Structures are given as C-alpha cells and as structure tokens.
Amino acid sequence: MVFRLANDSDASSIAAISIEVWVGTYLKNGVSAFFADYALQEFTVEKTSRLIRDPDQFMLVSENSEGLDGFIRVSANSPAPVSGCSEVEISTFYVQPRHHGKGIGTCLLSAALDHCRDASVGSVWLATNAENDPAIAFYLAAGFEHVGETHFRIGDQGYLNNVYRLSLP
C-alpha cells in the first residue's frame, strides 16, 4: 500500500470508487433512476478534478499495485450542521469493500488526522448514514463521539445521518 496526495490523474479512479462504494453502501434493494441519476451527476471526473485542485480540500489516496482502492477527503471551511464542532470535515471516506479489513481505512484516517494536527486543527467532524453500522462502528472505535443528527438531502428527500466529532490532541 502506498498513501499519497491525490493528483488530477486520479480523478477518474476516485469518481469510479465513489460510485462503487456509494451505490454498494446505500442502495441495498436495487438501483432506481432517482439514485442512479444522483450518483452519475455527483461523482464525475470533472467534479472530482475540481475538488483535487481546491485549496480547501485535502485528499489522500491509497494505491496498490493495480490502482487506487480508497481515499479520504478533508474539507476546510465546512461548518457542521450541529454546534460544538470545528469547520473541518472528513467529507468523503471510501475504501472499496473488497479491501475492507486490510488496514487501509485506518491508515487513511490516521494520515488525514495527522494532516489536521499539523495544521493545528483542534477537532474534526463527519456525518454518516444512521443505518451504516460498519462505518459507525469504525468511527466509534477510532474515538469519534456521536454529537448530533442531520439529514443528507437528494432533491426533496432527506436521509438521517449521525454527526460525529473527534478532538485532536
């Protein structure tokens, strides 16, 4: 495993991983046009390239001998939906499911948190679907605390998300 900063040539791989993980995690009973349209409009190479170049974004990828297998994105200037959190969000954190359990997520998170500490960030926050039990267990084991709830919105639909915070020593 190699962990490195994302670059523009990674945009298509990051977009593909995003679609794979998002669809596999949240669409348990089939893929409707509503969700397919969202995923295909949200996780594009163009949007991903803009994020990689955005100075308010820190994006780290995990690369194996075949290509990328995960990434984490930390966003500065991202106000939390609940009080008591910083404006630094772990906004996207995806590892391909077939690579779960290999320590990739732990290493990506650790490197992202080190980046935050180096920038003198006192805490980070994130939101995840309230039904995403594996992610919730991972975050709690990493020391995050549940601090509130919000709704992830797609059009006029809202989906309950838990908000977690981690204080950085």
Image (spheres, grey):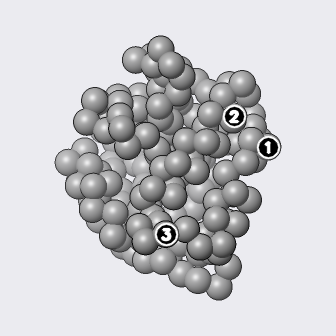
Considering every residue shown, the one lying at the far front of the view is 30
Q: Is residue 145 left or right of residue 64?
A: left
Residue 26 x, y percent position in the rendering: 45, 64
Cα distance, mark 1 to mark 3?
A: 27 Å
Q: Quadrant of residue 137?
A: bottom left
Q: Which of marks 1 and 2 precedes in the sequence?
A: 2
Q: Is residue 144 left or right of residue 1?
A: left
Residue 129 x, y percent position in the rendering: 41, 67
Q: Quadrant of residue 74?
A: top right
Residue at image mark 2: 11
Considering every residue shown, the one lying at the far bottom of the view is 156
Q: Secondary structure at mark 2?
A: helix
Determine whether label 2 and label 1 are within 8 Å by CB: yes
Residue at the spot x=33%, y=70% of the render?
Answer: 131
The type of residue carrying mark 1 is Glu
Residue 56 or residue 15, whichever sits in front:
15
Residue at image mark 3: 30
Residue 35 x, y percent position in the rendering: 61, 69
Residue 57 x, y percent position in the rendering: 63, 40
Q: Which of marks 3 and 1 precedes in the sequence?
A: 3
Residue 70 higher or lower than 40, as above or below: above
- Mark number for residue 46? 1
Cα distance, mark 2 to mark 1?
A: 8 Å
